[in-house]
Structures are given as structure tokens and as C-alpha cells.
Image: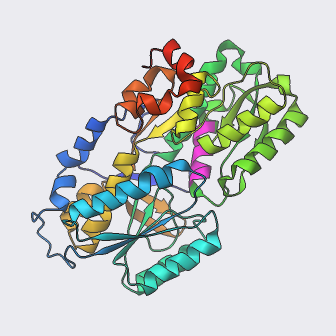
């Protein structure tokens, strides 16, 4: 890892040190990156010069935003719990709550975490602005808060996520590449994420940086709470407004919405599915990619993000400043705070060509998971067996 901090401003046009199109491949070996910085192994050890504020008997509060995004329950939650247990010799525990896409519910859950005296809180905010008062209350109570996946407002102690503008760039580039010479005159529809999620703006900015001047954005929608049913309704509006045969591609910000977009196109009677993007490498999306229904997804290593968040949370609550700094070699700005210590995990475009080298190699899915009877022939056609 580089020794200097990479600064990312998350509410003005970015610039990180990541070159455009330099999209690193995530494999299980990438986990060695943190260990090489002394970040993983040392968190659970005794090499810190700081005296721990807490021992191993700690409680990490984990607040996730919804159940519509498959990765949260299937990967993030169990990975974080497993890592916390590993770092604390089995004594640490995770207190968990899911907001079910409700900002009000998440605020109540956050208040309950504070009342229960969690030692540190990891929060993936439904609404980054709405959660700020609870973040402040945690600060006042002496409980550190680490924003996970989405940057919350308020006095955050750390942030673990991805280079979210790069996510959008990867998606936008996939559309331009898929359209080829026809891109210049092609009409596309953009199905963006929730306006309450700060990542949505970053994804959109990254995508537009690739799409602007190369395609015609005929319609663009934002999707309340990332709900697939809202995305489907908006796609149906786009089909009516633009015309089914005039839609050359669809930018969908994540996989859950991509599935809804594809359903709307099928129901409208599409003969050849236009390129549709996604994000999160949901199993259903990987299967759609195999079948040729979805062009791509953005694979973000759940292992690295979840492990990094658990490492940062435990290091923070145990007072291990050296380990915390090793884990947070980037920094970001929110609308309410400057220079938040951050760890930004790289991303990769997931396509038919690299399924083996990404989600299968990393152990996210097996060939058996992907290649069910429905997809057996498609898997065989691309040598996935």
C-alpha cells in the first residue's frame, strides 16, 4: 500500500489517484494487500504502541440499510461477524439490525444501539443526511461511528467503501463499448439509485463522464430507496416515452434494479435485449450475465470491504491507532466533515469472460450455484463447468 493519503472529495468532482480505466482485478489474493500493510494481522495482535481502550469482550453495532440488495444479508453481515470474532478470540460480538429501506427505522435502530452501549457502530445509511443526528448522539456518548459502503453525514470516525465514481465509470464504459460505432446516435435510459444515498451521485458522475458526448441520454430517473418495483415502473415510463425499439442500452446503477429493468423490457416484448449494466454481482445478475440478458455487473470484493470494516471498527474501539491508520490510508470529505479516514476498495467489471477469475475464484459462488438446470446450456457455451 502507498504510504501517503489519497484524498477524495465526495461532494465536488473527484479526483483520486486511480487512473481512468485502470480497473484492478479483485481476487482472493487481494486480501494480502491489507496484511502487507500490517493491517489485518496486527489488529488482532499486540504490536500496537497504543494501549487498548477495550479488551476482546466488545460489541460492534452493525446497521445495514435494506434486504432488497442481496449482498447485505448473504455476505456483508456474516463476513463482518466472522471477522470480529476472529479478531477478538471469539469474545467480541455483533449486534445487528436491518432498516428494511426505512430511514426512520434505521434512526430508531441507531438509538437502540446507543442505549445498549455498543462499543462502536458500523452504519450503512439508508439516508446519509437523516442519520446525522444519531451519529452526533453516538459521538456525544463516546461511541465511535464508522460509515460502511455509504458515507453518512455527521462526525464519522472512519469510512470503508469503494471508489464509487470509478464504479460509474466502469458501468458507463461498458455501455459505450457494447454500442461500438452506433454509440453516437444511440438513445439510452439511465436508472439511477436513491437520491438519499450519496453514492448515487458518485455513480452517476462517473457514468456521465464516460457517456457524455458519446450517447444520447433519452431519459434519466432516480429510484426511491433503490426499490426494484420503482425502477420497473420508471423503465415502463421510459419505454412509453422513448419507444421500445429506440432504447439502445440501459444504465442501471445496481443488480436489483437491473433485474426489474429486464423484466419490464421482456414484458414490453423486446426481441433482442439491449445492454443493461448493474452492480453488486448478485447471483441472479451473474446468471443473467451468463444467459446474455445483462451485459455486466460491477464486482466489489465483499470480503475486502467487510473485513476492512471489521478491522477498522475493532482497531478503533481498542485504541490501536497504528493499525487504524494502516487501514485508512485514504481520506474523504462529506458535506459536514473534512478528511475522514477512509479505506477505498477497488472494483472490477464482471462479464461473461471473467466470472471464473472473480466471483468463482474468490469463493463468492461455485459453478454449481450459478449453473443451475435453467442456465446449464448457457454455462456450457462459455466454458463454465
Q: Quadrant of residue 361?
A: top left
Q: Is residue 384 above or below residue 258?
A: above
| Percent of width and height locating residue 144 | 37, 75
Q: Is residue 189 above or below residue 184?
A: below
Where's the N terminus, which quadrant? Answer: top left
- Residue drawn at point x = 40 percent, y = 43 percent: 301
Residue 271 in view (yes/no):
yes
Q: Which residues are magenta?
A: 199-207
Q: Is residue 203 magenta?
A: yes
Where's the C terminus, which quadrant? Answer: top left
- Which SS does the magenta portion mostly show? helix
- Residue drawn at point x = 51 percent, y = 25 percent: 351
Q: Nearer the viewer, residue 186 or 290?
A: 290
Q: Is residue 230 above or below residue 99?
A: above
- Residue drawn at point x = 57 percent, y = 72 percent: 106
| Percent of width and height locating residue 350 | 49, 30
Q: Is residue 64 magenta?
A: no
Left or right of residue 131: residue 78 = left
Residue 296 in view (yes/no):
no
> Which color scheme is applied?
rainbow
Q: Quadrant of residue 16?
A: top left
Q: Is residue 171 above or below residue 162?
A: above
Q: Nearer the viewer, residue 353 or 100?
A: 100
Q: Quadrant of residue 354?
A: top left
| Percent of width and height locating residue 281 | 51, 38
- Residue drawn at point x = 27 percent, y = 50 percent: 4
Amino acid at each position: 500500500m502507498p504510504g501517503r493519503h489519497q484524498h477524495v472529495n465526495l461532494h465536488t468532482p473527484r479526483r483520486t489517484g486511480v487512473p481512468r480505466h485502470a480497473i484492478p482485478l479483485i481476487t482472493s489474493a487481494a486480501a494480502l494487500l491489507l496484511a502487507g500493510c500490517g493491517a489485518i494481522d496486527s489488529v488482532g495482535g499486540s504490536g500496537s504502541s497504543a494501549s487498548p481502550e477495550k479488551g476482546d469482550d466488545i460489541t460492534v453495532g452493525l446497521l445495514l440499510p435494506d434486504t432488497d440488495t442481496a449482498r447485505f444479508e448473504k455476505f456483508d453481515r456474516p463476513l463482518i461477524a466472522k471477522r470480529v470474532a476472529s479478531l477478538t478470540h471469539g469474545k467480541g460480538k455483533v449486534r445487528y439490525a436491518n432498516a428494511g429501506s426505512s430511514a426512520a427505522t434505521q434512526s430508531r435502530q441507531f438509538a437502540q444501539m446507543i442505549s445498549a452501549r455498543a462499543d462502536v457502530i458500523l452504519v450503512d445509511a439508508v439516508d446519509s443526511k437523516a442519520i446525522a443526528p444519531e451519529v452526533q448522539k453516538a459521538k456525544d456518548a463516546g461511541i465511535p461511528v464508522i460509515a460502511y459502503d455509504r458515507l453518512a453525514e455527521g462526525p464519522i470516525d472512519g469510512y470503508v467503501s469503494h471508489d464509487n465514481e470509478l464504479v460509474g465509470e466502469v458501468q458507463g464504459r461498458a455501455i459505450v463499448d457494447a454500442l461500438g460505432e452506433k454509440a453516437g446516435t444511440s438513445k439510452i435510459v439511465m436508472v439511477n439509485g436513491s437520491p438519499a444515498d450519496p453514492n448515487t451521485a458518485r455513480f452517476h458522475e462517473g457514468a456521465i463522464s464516460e457517456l457524455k458526448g458519446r450517447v444520447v441520454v433519452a431519459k434519466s430517473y432516480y429510484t426511491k430507496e433503490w426499490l426494484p418495483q420503482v425502477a420497473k415502473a420508471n423503465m415502463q415510463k421510459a419505454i412509453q416515452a422513448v419507444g421500445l425499439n429506440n432504447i439502445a442500452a440501459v444504465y442501471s446503477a445496481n443488480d436489483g434494479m437491473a433485474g426489474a429493468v429486464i423484466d419490464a423490457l421482456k414484458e414490453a416484448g423486446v426481441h433482442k435485449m439491449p445492454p443493461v449494466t448493474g452492480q453488486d454481482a448478485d447471483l441472479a445478475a451473474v446468471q443473467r450475465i451468463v444467459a446474455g440478458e445483462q451485459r455486466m455487473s460491477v464486482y466489489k470484493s465483499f470480503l475486502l470491504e467487510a473485513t476492512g470494516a471489521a478491522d477498522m471498527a475493532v482497531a478503533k474501539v481498542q485504541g490501536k491507532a497504528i493499525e487504524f491508520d494502516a487501514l485508512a490510508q485514504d481520506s474523504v470529505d462529506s458535506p459536514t466533515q473534512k478528511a475522514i479516514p477512509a479505506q477505498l476498495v477497488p472494483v472490477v467489471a464482471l462479464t461473461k469472460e471473467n466470472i471464473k477469475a472473480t466471483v468463482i475464484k474468490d469463493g463468492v459462488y461455485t459453478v454449481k450455484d450459478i449453473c443451475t438446470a435453467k442456465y446449464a446450456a448457457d454455462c456450457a457455451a462459455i466454458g463454465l463447468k
